[in-house]
Image (tube, helix red, strand yellow):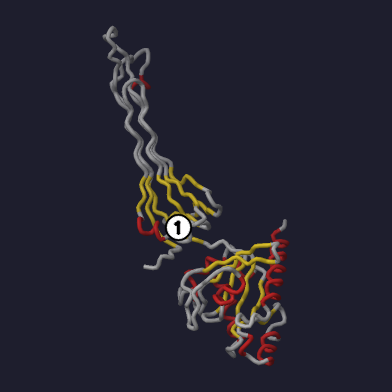
Amino acid sequence: MSRFVDETDIIVKSGSGGPGIVSFRREKFVPKGGPDGGDGGDGGDIIFKVRKDLRSLYEVKLKRIFKAHKGDAGSSGNKNGAKGKDCIIYVPPGTVIIAKDTRKILADLTKDDEQRVLLKGGKGGYGNARFATSVNQVPRYAQKGRPGNEIELTLQIKTIADVGLVGLPNTGKSTLLSILTDASPKIGNYPFTTLSPNMGIMYYKNERQLIIADVPGLIEGAHKGHGLGIQFLKHIERTKVLLFLIDLFRKDLTLQYETLLRELLNYSQHLLDKPKLLVGTKRDIVSNNEAENFLNMTADEKKICVSSVSRSGIDTLKNEIVLLMEKAYENSLP
């Protein structure tokens, strides 16, 4: 099993409340002592907490069922039972928690140490001391604790990055990521080398740090579940800008671009609303004419040619990425 898991179903159950008890004071010179049964403790809560060092839901998937502890019973002397121990589930930044039956989003956790109480534990039952009145001074009953709550959830990771790299398989996304950032993704000259999202930090003139994400290559029909792309399209939903990578060595430049547009559009119109840049890769192994064909391919999108091998165009690309980020910021202003 791959240790990268970005979606899984789990069952969570909060703890039941502890029972109150029936008890009466037994003091030496008080033969008819009053009620002193304490309340039961509340059940433990189900809590999700973000840990920035986590990248996968692998450990969560392995366990699958999570239960908080029940509350302790009350005791004599009006002593209440202890609250049940909470169950804390640690998840990566960008985890979305969804009710499996209704598909309602219950939480979207993005910040380190952010936490959410998803299910409260059941309330503890009242002890008999709670029911004493002037009419009934010796109540001989107490409440049971309320049961905990249970729900089945779907957890999804949506990667948090500034820039998303999209392209067909083997267009050089992983190699470009390794040149632009400090990432060390697996690189190979065959499709689907990337089997999970890779991220790296691009440092720009000691002024900025941008997170760039590379996802597995898209193929035609990815939005329907073909290939690997559909599993990871969600990872570019949070990005501010997109780089469309076009393989200059292939002759079907327009087809590559149209395939990417179509798959992103079919997945979500929102993806195409982001500022984007067309990046022609593998410039070192194509002629000037082939590079010109790419630059003249469409009139409405900005384009740049780069080579991750010779590093040509890389500095210009970094400048363009920063300009795109500024455009994305301006677009987000009210």
Amino acid type indicated by mark 1: Leu
- Percent across and percent down for residue 327 are 72, 66
Q: Is residue 162 above or below residue 83?
A: below
Name the quadrant containing residue 267: bottom right
Name the residue nearer the viewer: 8 or 267.
Answer: 8
Residue found at x 70% / y 67%: 322
- Percent across and percent down for residue 157 are 49, 61
Is disc 1 placed on a helix, strand or loop? Answer: strand
Residue found at x 42% / y 45%: 46
Residue found at x 38% / y 59%: 61
- Percent across and percent down for residue 98 are 46, 55
Neighbour class for label 1 at 10 Å: few (<14), some, many (≥20)? many
Name the quadrant containing residue 281: bottom right
Q: Quadrant of the C terminus?
A: bottom right
The residue indicated by pointer 1 is 155
Q: Is residue 35 above or below residue 109?
A: above
Q: Quadrant of the N terminus?
A: bottom left
- Percent across and percent down for residue 85 are 38, 40
Q: Is residue 153 above or below residue 26?
A: below
Mark yes or no: residue 262 visible.
Answer: no
Q: Is residue 263 left or right of residue 204?
A: left
Q: Is residue 291 above or below residue 1?
A: below
Name the residue nearer the viewer: 33 or 216.
Answer: 216
Q: Is residue 23 left or right of residue 6?
A: left
Name the residue nearer the viewer: 93 or 309.
Answer: 309
Q: How many marks?
A: 1
Mark yes or no: residue 278 visible.
Answer: yes
